[in-house]
Image (tube, rainbow, N blue to C red):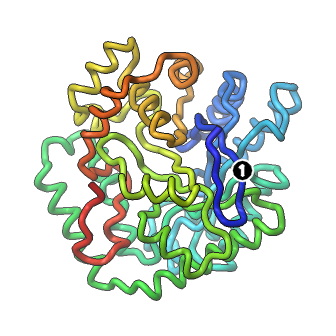
């Protein structure tokens, strides 16, 4: 368990969780049921994932079968993914399914209520603001690594990747308005605070927030975030955010590198040292990154629909020897502030250097 200890929030989150992004319908139900039987107690979902009904059904079945009690589970969801002016024609996925998945006080209130209804729960243990983007140019720039890096041919065009990211970053900064953006983020956060004080969310936090935006929450947040869920792996390890989280008592949760199989775009870019460490420990590269993440004091939410992979991740996290300090240092040295999924730079002032 990792402890969070910030103003008005005290609690713990299981260090190893189970992610559900891209798991749908019966596959989602059976995968969550299997993960709970394997011993996972931290289940992560989101309004965006369009699978909360299935996650809720799996939880209900597991409780009715006596596999677990509600009190033993830690359930996370996320809301307020899109900018407030999203209308279905200027955003990419799922808004037609969940039109309340936008920034703003009223839409975020409605999204929280929808999440609880879909999950068939009276409360979630953690509710997160899914990302900090407040206009579409920010969103397009922040999500560009996901769209480009994960294509099967991305490794053939590194210069084109850099040009695309810079072009989108420049467009986002051309309309950069920090005060307006903060007001939008504050409105969504107020809805989470209301749900926290009402007991519908036992803890609240954010996702994909860089250090500067966490610090700026002091200006508008009555309750500081307990958790920041973000892309985290040896090539993108956000050292300044690690330090600030430790100082304020906030837990970091990693996504993006702990799934049962790595996307080819990521697997191709793994430095040889990851494979060497994996061979030395009899682990897969995924399991090495999982162990490194946990040893950094960061929780992680690997996703797999394969029970054997779920079991292997659980064993690697809980029943295999730790990486040596030298191996951890070798992996630490790989940081290049290189995102595969989400760039924080469009949210920060122009010319902000990467977090190295």
In the image, what residue occupies the spot 66% across and 61% down? 204
Q: Quadrant of residue 286?
A: top left
**Residue 21 % position (x, y):** 54, 44
At horizontal 17% and vertical 58% (from top left) the residue drawn is 162
Horizontal side of 191 relative to 260 (left or right) equals right
Left or right of residue 210: residue 206? right
Q: Position of residue 197 (x, y in %)?
A: 80, 69
Please state if 211 lies on the left or on the right of 58 as rendered: left
- Mark 1 crowdedness (10 Å alpha carbons): few <14, some 14-19, many ≥20: some
Residue 351 vertical position relative to residue 295 in the rendered view, above or below: below
Seen in the picture, residue 330 relative to 161 is either above or below; the reply is: above
Q: Which one is nearer the viewer's eye here, 195 or 322? A: 322
- Position of residue 280 in the picture relative to residue 48 (left or right): left
Disc 1: which residue: 11
Residue at (47, 44) in percent of width and height: 255
Residue 349 vs 82, above or below: the answer is below
Where is the C terminus found, in terms of image quarters? bottom left
| Residue 335 horizontal/vertical position (percent) | 27, 45
Is residue 177 at all visible to an observer of this figure? yes
| Residue 97 visible in rendering | no
* Residue at disc 1, secondary structure: strand
> Is 189 or 244 nearer to us in this picture?
244
Q: Measuring 71% from the left and 55% from the top, which residue is drawn there?
A: 10
Which quadrant is the N terminus positioned in? top right
Q: Position of residue 68 (x, y in %)?
A: 81, 30
Single out the residue that lies furthest toward the left.
Answer: 159
What count of labels does the image hold?
A: 1
């Amino acid at each position: 368990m990792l402890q969070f200890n910030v103003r008005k929030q005290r609690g713990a989150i299981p260090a190893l969780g189970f992610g559900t992004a891209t798991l749908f319908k019966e596959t989602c139900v059976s995968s969550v049921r299997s993960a709970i039987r394997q011993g996972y107690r931290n289940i992560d979902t989101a309004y965006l994932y369009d699978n909360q009904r299935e996650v809720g059904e799996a939880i209900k079945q597991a409780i009715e079968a006596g596999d677990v009690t509600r009190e033993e589970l830690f359930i996370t969801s996320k809301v307020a993914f899109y900018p407030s002016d999203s209308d279905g024609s200027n955003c990419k996925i799922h808004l037609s399914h969940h039109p309340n998945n936008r920034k703003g006080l009223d839409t975020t209130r409605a999204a929280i209520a929808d999440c609880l209804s879909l999950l068939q729960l009276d409360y979630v243990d953690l509710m997160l603001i899914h990302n900090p983007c407040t206009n579409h140019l920010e969103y397009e720039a922040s999500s560009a690594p996901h769209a480009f890096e994960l294509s099967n041919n991305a490794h053939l065009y590194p210069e084109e990747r850099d040009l695309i990211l810079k072009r989108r970053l420049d467009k986002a900064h051309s309309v950069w308005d920090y005060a307006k953006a903060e007001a939008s983020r504050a409105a969504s956060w107020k809805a989470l605070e209301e749900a926290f004080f009402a007991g519908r969310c036992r803890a609240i936090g954010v996702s994909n927030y860089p250090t500067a935006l966490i610090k700026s929450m002091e200006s508008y947040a009555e309750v500081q975030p307990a958790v920041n869920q973000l892309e985290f792996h040896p090539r993108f390890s956000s050292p300044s955010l690690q330090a600030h989280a430790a100082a304020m008592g906030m837990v970091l949760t990693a996504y993006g590198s702990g799934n049962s199989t790595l996307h080819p775009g990521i697997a191709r870019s793994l430095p040889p040292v990851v494979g060497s460490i994996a061979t030395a420990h009899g682990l897969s590269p995924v399991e090495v990154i999982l162990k490194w993440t946990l040893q950094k004091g960061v929780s992680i939410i690997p996703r797999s629909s394969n029970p054997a992979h779920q079991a292997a991740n659980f064993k690697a996290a809980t029943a295999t020897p730790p990486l040596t300090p030298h191996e951890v240092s070798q992996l630490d040295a790989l940081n290049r502030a290189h995102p595969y999924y989400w760039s924080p730079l469009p949210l920060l002032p122009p010319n902000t250097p990467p977090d190295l």
